[in-house]
Image: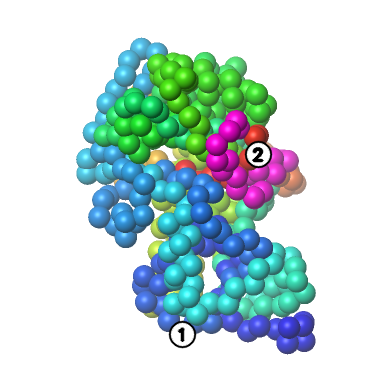
């Protein structure tokens, strides 16, 4: 195929990771048929290259794909250990392999055309979108759904990263509680500027993902992640002599109030992190990514444009900006901030808030549970900076580590960690 003979389709999907895979499954689930669909991605996604963790109601179409789920989670600080009942929600873990397999089946039923090459150019004339691929082909589409990681439109007022390393540990004897996950364990040494915590996602009493996470402006060295994880393993009382590291996961997720335009041109719609699905205050992405896929599929099934609703309400984006600023300037400490949220609100309310699903009245209760003086100061500072942003030229987006912008996902099987990064949506 040459540029003089473009492939004409109704819908082109750019990228083939989690967002595109969920979208393909949603299109199939909602019975979308008769559309000409092309998928443009240089990689055929298979196997376990990442893990998603999220909360939601049970008995969804995702249930058969889950590795594990928990009705109870722990949030631990140096002062206390709190066990939270999430009813009616549950916390769940989903590995990528079953998601990719489902997407492959959906792709076949949708009779989609796959082009194993990168999308190098995207030109929207308002009527059709021309996509030039790395192998010299051209796709002409009515709509483009672009899930490739993209930088923000401009610099944010606060830019942090959620970065982490996890070990899939297999033990010689029962050492994990499969009925309960550790959501946040703040007993880890706290960085000078930022927040750190560990968590444990057990699949069985002998197998679990044990992870060290930081919210901070800068990445650690490879040795730094290893040391932090070894320290957390020891804090949990796990004997390294009775453990084997079966896989290693590394990840980097942007945490910023910088804007990610979900619709950069009339017929190009962005999904996933590039479409604003990552929650700036926590880095969680999966639930919003799943909602986007479902909304797009429902729209297409009804003959409407494939444009999802904003990933989070505007007021939530403002609250995230204030919270990030308060954490970044040291007005509130991370462990204290999250401890107070869970201490003064039902766990189900906090989790729905983090998913952008609470009412304004509930959000007032959430805000009242934080330390008001530093949050008021952060609110005032954010307002001043918003005014300055309107009065001066747009600042370019800051440099973001390549892992955040979509380097190949990496899960290492066995052996010591390698330091390679993956983008993993929580």
Quick check: 33 above or below 396? Answer: below
**What residue did someone put label 1 on?**
34
At x 48%, y 67%, the residue is 104
Choose mark 1 or mark 2, whichever is in front: 2
Q: Position of residue 155 (x, y in %)?
A: 68, 42
Identify the disc placed on residue 420.
Answer: 2
The residue segment tinted magenta is 398-417
The CA distance from mark 1 to mark 2 is 41 Å
SS at mark 1 in the image: loop
Between residues 133 and 416, which one lies in front from this camera angle? 416
Q: Residue at x 65, y 39 (%)?
A: 420
Identify the residue at image location x=50%, y=36%.
246
Picture coordinates of residue 340, whole percent (x, y): 35, 23
Q: Is residue 149 left or right of residue 182?
A: right
Q: Nearer the viewer, residue 72 or 316?
A: 72
Left or right: 302, with 419 as reference point: left
Nearer to the camera, 250 or 254: 250
Please identify the quarter of the rendering in which residue 399 is found.
top right
């Amino acid at each position: 195929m040459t540029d003089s003979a473009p492939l004409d389709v109704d819908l082109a999907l750019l990228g083939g990771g989690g967002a595109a895979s969920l979208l393909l499954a949603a299109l199939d689930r909602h019975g979308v048929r008769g559309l000409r669909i092309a998928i443009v991605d240089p990689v055929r996604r298979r196997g376990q290259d990442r893990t998603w963790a999220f909360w939601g109601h049970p008995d969804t179409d995702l249930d058969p794909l889950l590795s594990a789920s928990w009705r109870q989670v722990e949030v631990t600080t140096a002062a206390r250990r709190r066990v939270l009942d999430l009813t009616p929600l549950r916390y769940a873990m989903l590995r990528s392999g079953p998601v990719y397999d489902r997407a492959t089946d959906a792709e076949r039923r949708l009779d989609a055309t796959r082009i194993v090459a990168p999308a190098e150019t995207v030109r929207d004339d308002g009527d059709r979108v021309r996509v030039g691929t790395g192998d010299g082909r051209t796709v002409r589409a009515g709509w483009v759904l672009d899930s490739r990681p993209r930088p923000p439109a401009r610099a944010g007022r606060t830019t942090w990263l959620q970065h982490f390393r996890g070990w899939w540990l297999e033990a010689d004897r029962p050492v994990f509680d499969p009925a309960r996950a550790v959501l946040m364990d703040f007993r880890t040494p706290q960085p000078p500027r930022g927040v750190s915590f560990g968590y444990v996602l057990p699949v069985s009493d002998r197998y679990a993902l044990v992870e060290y996470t930081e919210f901070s402006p800068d990445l650690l060295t490879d040795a730094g992640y290893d040391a932090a994880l070894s320290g957390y393993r020891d804090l949990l009382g796990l004997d390294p002599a009775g453990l084997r590291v079966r896989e290693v996961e590394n990840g980097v997720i942007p945490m910023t109030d910088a804007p990610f335009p979900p619709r950069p041109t009339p017929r190009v719609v962005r999904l996933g992190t590039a479409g604003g699905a990552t929650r700036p205050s926590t880095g969680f992405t999966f639930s919003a990514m799943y909602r986007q896929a479902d909304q797009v599929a429902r729209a297409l099934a009804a003959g409407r444009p494939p444009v999802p609703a904003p990933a989070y309400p505007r007021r939530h984006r403002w609250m995230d900006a204030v919270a990030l600023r308060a954490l970044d300037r040291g007005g509130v400490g991370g462990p204290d901030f999250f401890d107070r949220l869970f201490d003064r609100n039902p766990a189900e309310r906090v989790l729905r808030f983090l998913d952008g699903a609470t009412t304004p009245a509930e959000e007032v209760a959430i805000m009242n549970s934080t330390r008001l003086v530093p949050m008021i100061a952060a609110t005032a500072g954010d307002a001043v900076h918003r005014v300055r942003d309107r009065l001066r030229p747009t600042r370019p987006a800051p440099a973001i580590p390549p892992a955040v912008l979509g380097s190949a996902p990496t899960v290492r099987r066995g052996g010591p960690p390698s330091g390679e990064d993956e983008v993993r949506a929580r």
